[in-house]
Amino acid sequence: MTPPHHRVLRALDRFHAARPWDHNARFHPWILRQLPTRVGSALDVGCGSGDLARLLAGRAGRVHGIDADPAITARARELTPTTAPVTYTVADAPAGLPDRSHDVITCVATLHHLPLTEALEAFRDRLAPGGTLVVVGLHRARTPVDHLLGLASVPLNIVMALLRNRGRRAPRPVSLSAPTRPADLTFAEIAREARTVLPGARLRRRLFWRYTLVWRRR
């Protein structure tokens, strides 16, 4: 017999498929609040269809998005005005990251696809002095706190889906992104490694099955 919580998760998946909304985009305003009003350059790792990269263009003189999916990257170019200071590259992170420094590096729902230590080291090495790294990531639930936040996210997820799709006959489109897979590492494992590579990094568990990381390079 299927455990009750598995049935609940399957029902939630069906509900969300009928009323989709972008969980990652919910964090975009929060990401912008972590950044200075104006910076020289920004790098968005795992840029998808470029929603965050286009927002960063309002803060940065130039923005570069990188994603491993050619189709999604092509869509990002289509959606980005030619006058915007945004460019995109198809490449795998961290090996394919541009070899220059940036004032801001962002990485949303991508880090769990990458080798953690290598990726964090690459972000650190490409962040200019005084620059800011902001990560919104996924982790494997393990502790009671993790599971409580997950349970609290279920009704909030339903409310957000209803609000975002209110009055729409067709489902509201969500940003294109690469297929995701479950995170392997727990929050504690991620935090331990992050604080080793990025001394002083601030990490916090969040609702909607996410965590955040902010690090400023001195």
Image (spheres, grey):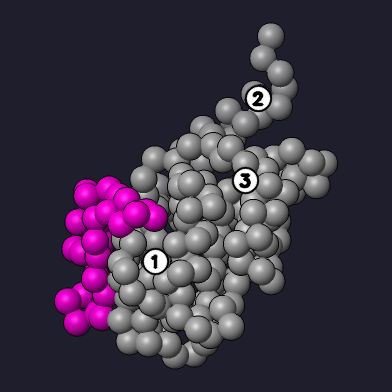
User: Percent from the top left, x then y, of residue 152?
Assistant: 74, 48
User: Percent from the top left, x then y, of residue 119?
Assistant: 47, 56
**Residue holding disc 3:** 139
Assign the N terminus to one quadrant of the image. top right
106 sits left or right of 217 in the view = left
The vertical placement of 59 against 164, above or below, is: below
Pick whichever, 25 or 73, lies toward us: 73
* Mark 1 / mark 2, whichever is N-terminal: 2
Q: Image point 24% across, 71% down: which residue?
A: 87
Mark 1 closeness class: few <14, some 14–19, many ≥20 residues within 10 Å = many
User: Percent from the top left, x then y, of residue 217?
Assistant: 56, 78
Residue located farthest toward the top when viewing the structure as drawn = 1
Element type at mark 1: strand
Q: Image point 72% across, 22% down: which residue?
A: 4
Label 3, label 2: how many angstroms apart (C-alpha)? 19 Å
Q: Image point 54% across, 68% down: which residue?
A: 134
**Residue holding disc 1:** 44
Q: Does the magenta segment cover residue 161?
A: no
Element type at mark 3: loop
Q: Which residues are magenta?
A: 67-96
Assign the C terminus to one quadrant of the image. bottom right
Q: Residue 10 occupies which quadrant of the picture?
A: top right
Is disc 1 in contact with disc 2, using a CB cutoff of under 8 Å?
Answer: no
User: Percent from the top left, x then y, of residue 48?
Assistant: 34, 56
- Front disc: 3 or 2: 3
Label 1, label 2: how many angstroms apart (C-alpha)? 34 Å
Q: Amino acid at mark 2?
A: His
